[in-house]
Amino acid sequence: MRMRKKPNLIPRVERCEALLERDVEAHKGRWLEDFPGFSALHLELGCGKGRFTVGMAVKNPDVLFVAVERVLDAMVMAMERAREDELSNVRFLDFDAVGCESVFASGEVDRIYINFPDPWRKTKQFKRRLTAPSFLKIYERILKPGGEIWFKTDNRPLFDWSVEQFTAEGWAISEVTNDLGPDGAGGCMTDYEVKFREQGVPINRLVAKKRR
């Protein structure tokens, strides 16, 4: 379902300007240098309305979170949440995940979160999945040695397919579950996750670790 256009979108974005990075390539290789005081860099692909983003940022004040979202109508809600909580450890980027290597240098990212991505159900669309081999190769390059991907989805076919892709690409997989507990990993849920739990839909999760 396409999200409705938010009223007064541009003024709302402008009020959160301090959290938005418009020159997405400006900090490549320098994120922790340009934003000092943080011990790690975490990247969230598809932050949506930002419930998970803000929750994790509050729980981990020593981590710099970079939240990516290509739907501005959703991202403005995430930015408003971060602004309301007066967070200084979150930056928002409006761009597509396929361009990650233009934004992050080799070995710069400590962890990547992929929460409830589009399953792209048609066979011809599989390559657009955020856990497709082409994307996994990108993640492998921007993650530090031993860096992790935390992946969650309600879609069991996508999850099983993703496990196969991670395995084939040589990632070490752990914490695999098809029924994630109510508190979720890290104690934070996305808006989708809250809705799915209310409906009794089981949540699938894994951690994939870069081997080298």
Image (cartoon, grey):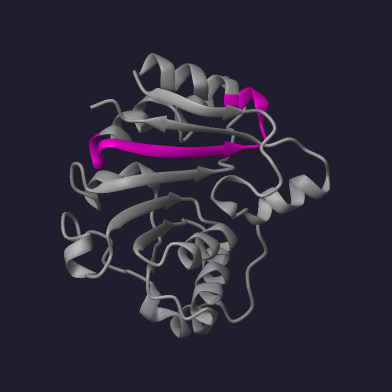
Within the image, what quadrant is residue 101 found in? Answer: top left
Verify whether residue 152 appears in magenta: yes
In the drawing, does residue 149 fall left or right of residue 203? left
Q: Is residue 122 left or right of residue 75?
A: right
The answer to whether residue 43 is magenta is no
Q: In the rendered image of this protein, does residue 114 appear above or below residue 26?
A: above
| Residue 115 seen in the figure | yes
Query: As rendered, which of 195 and 102 lies closer to the eye?
Result: 195
Position above or below: 200 against 56: above
- Residue shown at 31%/55% (left/top)? 41
Q: Position of residue 20 (x, y in %)?
A: 38, 72
Q: Identify the residue shown where x is 42% and y is 17%.
A: 167
Q: Is residue 130 left or right of residue 176?
A: left
Closer to us: 2 or 17: 17
The C terminus: image quadrant = top left
**Residue 49 visible in this rendered orientation of the protein:** no
Q: Which residues are magenta?
A: 141-159
